[in-house]
Image (cartoon, rainbow, N blue to C red):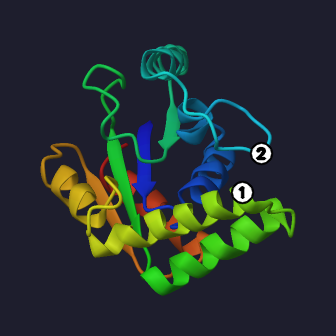
Amino acid sequence: MKLYIFGASGSGVTTLGQALGLYLDIPYFDSDNYFWVPTVPPFTIKREPTERNSMISRELKIAPDWIFGGSALNWGADVFPPFDGVVFLWIPADIRMQRLKERERFRYGNALDAEMKEQHEDFLEWAADYDNNTGIANRTLQVHEEWLSKMTMPVLTLRGDMSLEERMEKIMEWSRNNHL
C-alpha cells in the first residue's frame, strides 16, 4: 500500500500517519522531515527543493509499502511514485487552531524570545488562513479540494473531529473495500 494522507496544519496528519504505520507495520514518511532542515528551534530553514525531492523520492522507491503524510502538492510531478489511495483530513478551524496553539506551547513552552514569538504568531496567522482563503497561505482548503477533484485513485475524505481510533477504523474499512 502506498498511501498519501494530508490536510491542514493541526488536522492530525502526523499522528494518524504514525499510528497507522505502526499498526500496519509499514514506514511513515512525514513531509516536514524533508521540507525543513533540522534546526534548533525547528522549522526555521527550508530545505532546497531539489535536495528535498531527491531525498523523498529515493526513500519511497526503496520501501514496497509506505504512508506519506503532509501537504506536498507542489513538490513536482515526478517526485512521488503513484499513490494507491489518498486520505484527506479536515476538522473545524476552531478545534484545529486550538490544537496548534497547544502544540506550539508544548514544543516551545515559555521560551519564545521576540523573534520566535513573531514566527509563532506568523505561523498561526498562516495556519488560520487555510479555511479563509485570503491569500496569506498557498496551502488552503480550496487548493486541497481542487487537487482532490483531479484524483483518479481512491480518495477517502474524513471530515469532523474524530478520534484516532475512529479515523483508523474508517481507513482500514476503506482500504479493504478498495483492495489497497
Q: Nearer the viewer, residue 143 or 2?
A: 143
**Can you identify the residue that label 1 sits on?**
116
* 70 versus 166 height, above or below: above
**Can you identify the residue that label 2 sits on?**
41
Label 2: element kind: loop
Q: Decide if residue 59 is on the left or right side of residue 50.
A: right
Within the image, what quadrant is residue 137 found in?
bottom left
**Mark closest to the chain's N terminus, 1 or 2:** 2
Query: Do callouts 1 and 2 mark residues in contact (Cβ within 8 Å)?
Result: yes
Percent across and percent down for residue 178 are 30, 50
Badge 1 density bin: few <14, some 14–19, many ≥20, Cα 10 Å: some
Residue type indicated by callout 2: Pro
Q: Decide if residue 89 is on the left or right side of residue 157.
A: right
Tell me what residue is drawn at x 44 percent, y 50 percent.
Answer: 5
Tell me what residue is drawn at x 57 percent, y 51 percent.
Answer: 17
Residue at the far bottom in the pictured view: 94
Q: Tag on residue 67?
A: none
Tell me what residue is drawn at x 54 percent, y 68 percent.
Answer: 124
Q: Can residue 176 be spotted in the picture? A: no
